[in-house]
Image (cartoon, rainbow, N blue to C red):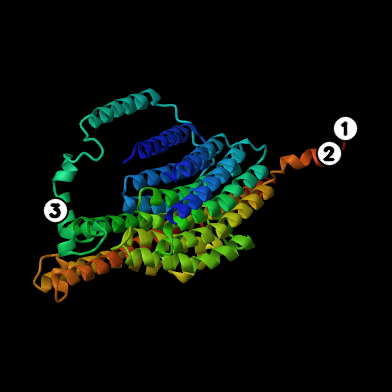
């Protein structure tokens, strides 16, 4: 890491602090949503410079993309400005100050960036790096760690995504009580979306197939380059959101009906879990893919391919369901 | 030969950087929304073309060149579209081009 | 070495765009600034991929280019919905 890179990162961090202060300061919720998109852009850039391309890709797709769309969908349901809350300001400031002090104090114990004696470098990381070519033989070690060595964690994460989706559907799936319903033209993406804007519509429709193609590349090339099920699922969801924005949410719902999305959300964890059970039936441990094919390395490849597909299906289903539940809220 | 490619790539990247910077200054200093959009468009068209062109020279004929070309084509499609969408939304919302005013007004006696 | 000038230029432009996003004054200026920051991030990611010697990370820049466009369209749709609602409220008020 050169001096130039360090200055590069410090400059970006400075911009992030300015953005964060502006988000706190502004009362306009739309401005806050836009600024949080900027914040996310910059943090993805920093992840990238620290060589964490998989994380940066996730941050790019989720933080700057889907979150902004969901923020706007939520903002369409609420008022323009933040309600001024004056109660408990001093207490809040005190809490924030104390926590900041504790966090700053904690950073003194953190190892320096890239320190070879840091716990993260001494524990299991060297073993993963050393054994990945032998046991799994994929160039992207992140995929090997995520999908195989720490397959239990990723199974857990898939269930977290699924549960979060169920939670949002529980909260937003039911019609709001005591509020007047509005016509679909007045809901986010609604009945027509941006159909009257011819130029974005033509260009956007042209791009959707290419976005889906790129999502497939991210999904199935994840062993070799940054990417995998999570990122690909988000990109597929983004292309469906693009379709909903251009043609109206109702049209998108016809293309991918709600029952199918729920089925997709549930299918992913099932695929993942059954892969683990299949490993057990073939005589291995739960999620030990080595037994899936004639030789262990091929088995690992098949296992990673299948569970990444499961993750991708879940993420797609959950994200599109969440988008619909925000967009259609309060519609007649 | 590698030297020539590096120099050509440096020239393209630096000139591209110059146009990006000019666009950035314009987006901050121009007097109203539409002129700012004009300045911002410089960074997306000329700036992006030169910078990505400079990177293509570095990449040579590889998969990276295909990706760079995809990024460039994508930006050349989407950024005018986004600009058009934004300008039409602003115009519909009743924001008038500020610079057009003195030209339309009656000359003061 | 060949990347220093362009990286500095893009970073300074990002700071200028951030300034425009902060001062506004209209929401459209903010959207313009965010869009501009997005495209500058795409360029910066592309240059940085070569700068840190990992040109295979260009996928990230490509993803950003896709996502940025969807964001702008979402903003446009938000403006359309808001205009529809205020129109409906005016009608009710009459």
Q: Nearer the viewer, residue A223 or A276?
A: A223
Q: Nearer the viewer, residue A328 or A177?
A: A328
In the rendered image, the vertical position of residue A170 relative to residue B21, given as above or below: below
The residue that label 3 is drawn on is: A127
**Circles 1 and 2 on the same chain:** yes
In the rendered image, the vertical position of residue A109 relative to residue A205, given as above or below: above
The residue carrying pointer 2 sits among few (fewer than 14), some (14 to 19) or many (20 or more) residues within 10 Å by Cα, namely few
Viewer-nearest of labels 1 and 3?
3
Where does the image place residue C49, in percent across and percent down from the top left?
A: 39, 51
Residue C42 is tagged as none
Horizontal arrangement in the rendering, residue A115 relative to residue B74 (left or right): left
- Circle 1 — which element? loop
The residue that label 1 is drawn on is: B108
Q: Chain of mark 3?
A: A
Asked whether residue B98 is in view, the answer is yes
Farthest residue in the left direction? Answer: A283
Where does the image place residue A14, in percent across and percent down from the top left?
A: 42, 33
* Placement of the N terminus of chain A among the 4 image quadrants: top left
Asked whether residue A180 is in view, the answer is no
Q: Chain of mark 2?
A: B
Q: Are marks 1 and 3 in contact (CB under 8 Å)?
A: no
Where does the image place residue A158, in percent across and percent down from the top left?
A: 27, 59
**Circles 3 and 2 on the same chain:** no
The residue that label 2 is drawn on is: B105
Q: Quadrant of residue B81?
A: bottom right
């Amino acid at each position: 890491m050169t001096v130039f890179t360090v200055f590069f990162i410090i400059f970006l961090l400075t911009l992030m602090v300015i953005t964060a202060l502006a988000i706190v300061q502004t009362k306009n919720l739309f401005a806050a949503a836009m600024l949080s998109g900027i914040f996310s852009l910059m943090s993805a850039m920093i992840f990238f410079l620290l060589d964490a391309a998989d994380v940066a890709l996730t941050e790019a797709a989720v933080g700057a993309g889907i979150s902004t769309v969901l923020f706007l969908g939520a903002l369409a349901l609420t008022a323009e400005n933040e309600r001024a809350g004056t109660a408990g300001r001093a207490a809040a400031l005190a809490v924030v100050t104390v926590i900041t002090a504790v966090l700053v104090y904690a950073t003194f114990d953190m190892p320096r960036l890239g320190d070879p004696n840091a716990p993260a470098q001494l524990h299991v990381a060297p073993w993963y790096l050393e054994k990945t070519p032998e046991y799994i033989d994929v160039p992207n070690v992140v995929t090997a760690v995520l999908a195989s060595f720490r397959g239990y964690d990723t199974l857990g994460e898939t269930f977290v995504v699924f549960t979060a989706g169920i939670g949002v559907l529980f909260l937003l799936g039911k019609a709001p009580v005591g509020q007047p319903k509005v016509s679909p033209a007045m809901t986010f993406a609604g009945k027509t979306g941006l159909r009257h804007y011819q130029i974005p519509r033509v260009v956007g429709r042209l791009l959707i197939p290419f976005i889906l193609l790129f999502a497939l590349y991210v999904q199935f090339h994840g062993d070799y380059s940054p990417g995998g099920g999570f990122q690909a699922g988000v990109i597929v969801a983004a292309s469906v959101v693009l379709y909903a924005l251009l043609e109206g949410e109702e049209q998108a719902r016809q293309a991918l009906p709600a029952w199918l999305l729920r089925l997709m959300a549930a299918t992913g964890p099932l695929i993942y879990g059954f892969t683990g059970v299949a490993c057990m039936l073939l005589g291995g441990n739960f999620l030990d893919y080595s037994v899936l094919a004639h030789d262990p390395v091929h088995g690992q490849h098949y296992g990673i391919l299948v569970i990444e597909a499961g993750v991708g299906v879940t993420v797609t289903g959950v994200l599109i369901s969440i988008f619909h539940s925000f967009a259609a809220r309060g519609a007649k | 030969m590698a030297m020539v490619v590096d120099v050509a790539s440096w020239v393209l990247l630096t000139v591209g950087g110059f146009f990006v910077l000019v666009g950035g200054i314009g987006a901050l200093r121009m007097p109203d929304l539409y002129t700012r959009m004009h300045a911002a468009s410089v960074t997306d068209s000329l700036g992006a073309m030169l910078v990505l062109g400079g990177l293509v020279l570095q990449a040579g004929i590889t998969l990276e060149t295909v990706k760079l070309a995809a990024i460039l084509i994508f930006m050349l499609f989407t950024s005018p579209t986004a600009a058009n969408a934004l300008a039409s939304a602003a115009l519909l919302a009743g924001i008038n081009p500020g610079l057009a005013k003195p030209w339309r007004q009656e000359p003061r006696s | 070495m060949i990347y220093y000038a362009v990286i500095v230029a893009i970073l300074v432009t990002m700071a200028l765009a951030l300034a425009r996003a902060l001062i506004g004054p209209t929401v459209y200026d903010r959207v313009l600034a965010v869009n501009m920051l997005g495209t500058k991030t795409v360029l910066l990611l592309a240059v940085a991929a070569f700068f840190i010697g990992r040109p295979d990370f260009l996928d990230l820049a490509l993803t950003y280019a896709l996502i940025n466009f969807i964001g702008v369209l979402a903003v446009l749709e938000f403006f359309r919905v808001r205009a529809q609602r205020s129109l409906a409220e005016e009608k009710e008020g009459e």
